[in-house]
Image: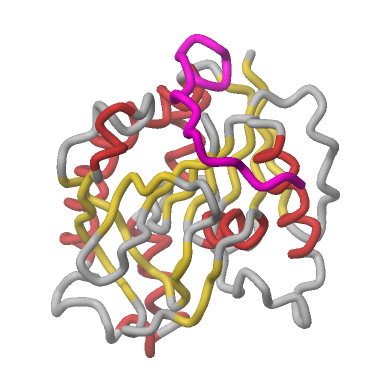
Amino acid sequence: MTRILIVQPDTSDPLGPLGDWLTEAGAELDVRLQPEQDLPDLVGYRAVVCLGGGMGAEDDAKHPWLADVRRLLSKAAARNLPTLGICLGAQLLAVATGGRVEVAPDGPEVGPHLVSKKDAAWTDPLFADLPLVQDVLQFHTDAITRLPPGAELLASSPRYAHQAYRLGRCVYGVQFHIETTPAVVESWAAECPGEAEFARPGALEHETLVTVHADIAETWRPFAHRFVKLAAGELEAAVASHRTLPLA
């Protein structure tokens, strides 16, 4: 089994179908809910996944344990351990490795959206087989405004450019969600009505969410399978950029 550490910063964003996709590809998942459960050492893990949450990536005053998560992600990046940060996870990874996260200058990005591949994605082991334009679910009020030094931009959108990136050979961040269900998104909309107003009319209706999540599964389930293969050493990592990766 390929052991993967799952860091869950918030009960509101569980692993969801992404967990099913990882396990069906042969992964053994160790889920650590923060801050209730300690973060382990990385020894023995083949990969790390960090999920989303409602807090800011540097909201240490309210959530001091975020520093420990950033430290773990920094170590994973420095060791070139296969890593996937999702939404808040991608923002934590960016901050931990020299990038910048700020309140989204053009307002929250909420609901089903499309992102498109950048040039570097066509030769990336995880992103190369994705379609040119991918269905994703957005629900964020902060944005990655500067990528970490040496990062390769893999996906973008007209509103917020930094939708997906890779550090080194196998460390990834995606600003969007691929792990949600209609029920989870509906709960976020109910808990954050101000942010939900930024969604397009009808975008958060149940039938719309059911349809978009079916599209997300079609695209991102194979992506999750490739991530497990990458972690298991069955898929070759990306060719290293000539740019340097920040050390922990």
Instruction: Tell me the quarter of the image containing the N terminus.
Output: top right
Residue shown at 80%/57% (left/top)?
A: 68
Given residues 206 and 18, the one toward you in this image is 18
Given residues 89 and 206, the one toward you in this image is 89
In the image, is residue 102 above or below residue 146? below
Q: Quadrant of residue 154?
A: top left
Residue shown at 47%/27% (left/top)?
A: 227
- The residue at the far top in this view is 234
Given residues 94 and 231, the one toward you in this image is 94
Q: Quadrant of residue 218?
A: top left
Residue shown at 53%/16% (left/top)?
A: 26
**Which secondary structure dominates the residues rendered in magenta?**
loop
Query: Would you say residue 13 is visible in this rendering?
Result: no
The residue range painted magenta reads 230-248
Query: Would you say residue 10 is visible in this rendering?
Result: yes
**Residue 231 location (% of width, % of height):** 57, 21
Given residues 127 and 98, the one toward you in this image is 98
Q: Is residue 75 left or right of residue 155?
A: right
Task: Confirm whether the magenta stretch covers residue 242.
Answer: yes
In the image, is residue 26 above or below residue 223? above
**Residue 47 location (% of width, % of height):** 63, 30
**Residue 78 location (% of width, % of height):** 70, 38
Residue shown at 56%/72% (left/top)?
A: 54
Task: Confirm whether the magenta stretch covers residue 55.
Answer: no
Q: Quadrant of residue 162?
A: bottom left
